Image: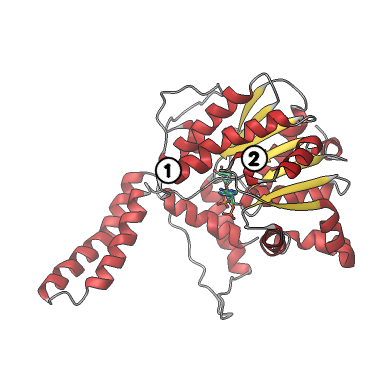
Amino acid sequence: METGSIAERFRERSILITGSTGFPAKMLVEKILRIQPDVRKLYLLVRAPDAAAAEERLLTEVVGKGLFDVLREQHGASFHSFIKEKVCPLPGDITHQNFGLGNSEILQLSQDVDIIVDGAATTNFMERYDVALATNTAVVIHLCQFAKQCDNLKMLLHVSTAYVAGEKAGLLLEKPFQIGARHYDKGHTLWLAKYICADESYGRDVTSTIGTRPSIPGDMVINAMMAAINSHWKKQAQVIYHVTSAHQNPLPLSLIVESMYKYFHINPRTNKDGKIIKNKRVLMFKRFAYFQAYMTLRYKVPLEMMHAANVLFGGIYSKNYKKLNRGYNILMTGKGVRPICLLQRMVRASF
Ligand SMILES: NC(=O)c1ccc[n+]([C@@H]2O[C@H](COP(=O)([O-])OP(=O)(O)OC[C@H]3O[C@@H](n4cnc5c(N)ncnc54)[C@H](OP(=O)(O)O)[C@@H]3O)[C@@H](O)[C@H]2O)c1
């Protein structure tokens, strides 16, 4: 499919996007505005107490970011009027019915919206289970209920994560989700969301779910999202895509890590005081057991020595020991997922 024809799909369309202060949804907002300035409206649901606060978040946390520099340059002095005309921030919360919006707003949205992109989630691997369940799972019920009210909806796209595929290795075939498989903690709530999404919407509206892996560059994910919207326009089916590296043209995490290292070597990052942050190579482990062994030798053994010294010297290292030990435990109970999150944060820092 030609890029041009995908861009055409968004001409004169209104899109409700959740999670635009987050990573993939923010990139989607930028890309749509850049390649299809004739989009009718982007409604961005932003967590905020009122309209003014939502607008403030839009300006500082979405369009104010370096990611929008190309657009800013393209539009010059009219950038802000362009954003004002095309983007409508809505103060809301996905965990509430109708996202906590008023009746008149919901009515207007339901009459206008052609596409819904759900990019909101809690991505905190240490999240309390009830909060994760409310944000990543129950929310899909509200989303589907709203989708059913929309007169002109052509597409509902739910963004998720590849972790919902569980811990299987080898060739993974795409097939509808069934209750009973093993999943990661946060993936579990997101997998349930997919299941509900399928159950609530199947046969009514087009529903597509995009699962992505942390090692896939964000622009590829956004392109896949837009291509999925285009390909399944008005089609009555539920389709699940995994955006991931495959046997053909593989993109190993090691290549991304090395590219990032080289990039930040040439373009060093600075801290708040303008000092250059040392560019370190990210450690990569082929097996979780190697990671555990490294962590034990590098951190656990010195921590235990600190603990012994603490007991010996009447608790003078108590505060430090507790802090470091807590950090160690958080890292290790994250089952190695935490380092990947740190890596993602480094990628985000470049936007
Ligand atoms: N980032 C990646 O590289 C990546 C990779 C694979 C998959 N994904 C998937 O993409 C989805 C979004 O991830 P992300 O990286 O964008 O996460 P993120 O950066 O943490 O952003 C999450 C977004 O959801 C919003 N949100 C959370 N709770 C909300 C609520 N109750 N009401 C309204 N908005 C709420 C957040 O708003 P606030 O700003 O108010 O918190 C934020 O905009 C997840 O399903 C994730 O698994 C992301």
From the image, which quarter does the N terminus lie in?
top right
Relative image position of residue 44 (x, y in whole percent): 71, 49
Element on which disc 2 rests: helix
Q: Which residue is mark 2?
A: 98
Give the mark count.
2
Q: Is residue 290 visible?
A: yes
Please determine whether, in this image, residue 58 is positioned above or below residue 131.
below
Answer left or right for 103 relative to 100: right
Disc 1 Cβ-to-ligand 1 distance below 8 Å: no
Please determine whether, in this image, residue 189 is positioned above or below residue 300.
above
Tag of residue 130: 1
Answer left or right for 306 relative to 285: left
Q: Amino acid at mark 2?
A: Asn
From the image, which quarter does the C terminus lie in?
bottom right
Q: State which mark lies toward you, 2 or 1.
A: 2
Q: Which comes before the other along the chain, label 2 or label 1?
A: 2
Relative image position of residue 143 (x, y in whole percent): 63, 35
Relative image position of residue 190 (x, y in whole percent): 51, 37
Q: Residues within 10 Å of mark 1 (few under 14, many from 20)?
A: few
Relative image position of residue 231 (x, y in whole percent): 76, 28
